[in-house]
Amino acid sequence: MTQKTLEQTRLFTRMVAEKQGWVLNPDTEFYESLVEGLTANYNRYGYYLCPCRDSDGSREADKDAICPCVWSRKDIPEFGHCYCALYLSHEFAESGAPCRAIADRRYEA
Ligand code: SF4
């Protein structure tokens, strides 16, 4: 399996942000920790499993949690950022408000 480098993952996050109309977390240290997590997950599982979530055992079981996860489409408009706070809405980023812990929708009924 091809291994991803940190730079490849940074590029991936920039492309996702651009495509979705989001911005990356401006806290560089925090952003880099998520890039490391995403890269480690890719190199372990073969896909960009969310860096804030555990694998459910297979790509099929994890498919909704592959970055950008399906829940980010609800969380970003509602809270201004995704569960991990990797991606922020432009509006939220411009507000300067701190990211807060939000509930994980993964196992919501
Ligand atoms: S919570 Fe954020 S970082 Fe995690 S998979 Fe969803 S979009 Fe990606």
Image (spheres, grey):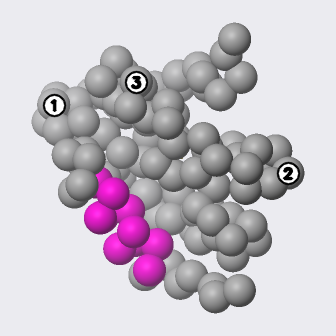
Q: Which residues are magenta?
A: 8-17
How many numbered marks are there? Answer: 3
Label 2 and label 1: CA atoms lie apart by 36 Å
Q: Earlier in the sequence, mark 2 or mark 1?
A: 2
Q: Secondary structure at mark 3?
A: helix
Q: Residues within 10 Å of mark 1 (few under 14, many from 20)?
A: few
Of residues 43 and 25, the one nearer the viewer is 43
Q: Quadrant of the C terminus?
A: top right
* Kind of residue at disc 1: Glu
Crowd band around label 3 with a 10 angstrom C-alpha radius: few (<14), some (14–19), many (20+): few
**Residue pointed to by mark 3:** 74
Q: Residue furthest right?
A: 57
**For residue 56, side relative to residue 78 (left or right):** right
Quarter of the picture holding the N terminus: bottom right
Q: Main secondary structure of the magenta part?
A: helix
Discs 2/1, front: 2
Q: Which mark is residue 91?
A: 1
Is 23 left or right of 58, judged from the image as shown? left
Badge 2 vs badge 1, beta-carbon distance below 8 Å: no
**Left or right of 8 in this view: 90:** left
Say which amino acid is labelled 3.
Lys
* Residue at image location 26% in from the left, 47% down from the top: 20
Residue at the (44%, 34%) spot, across then down: 72
Identify the residue under disc 2: 57
* Residue closest to the far bottom: 2
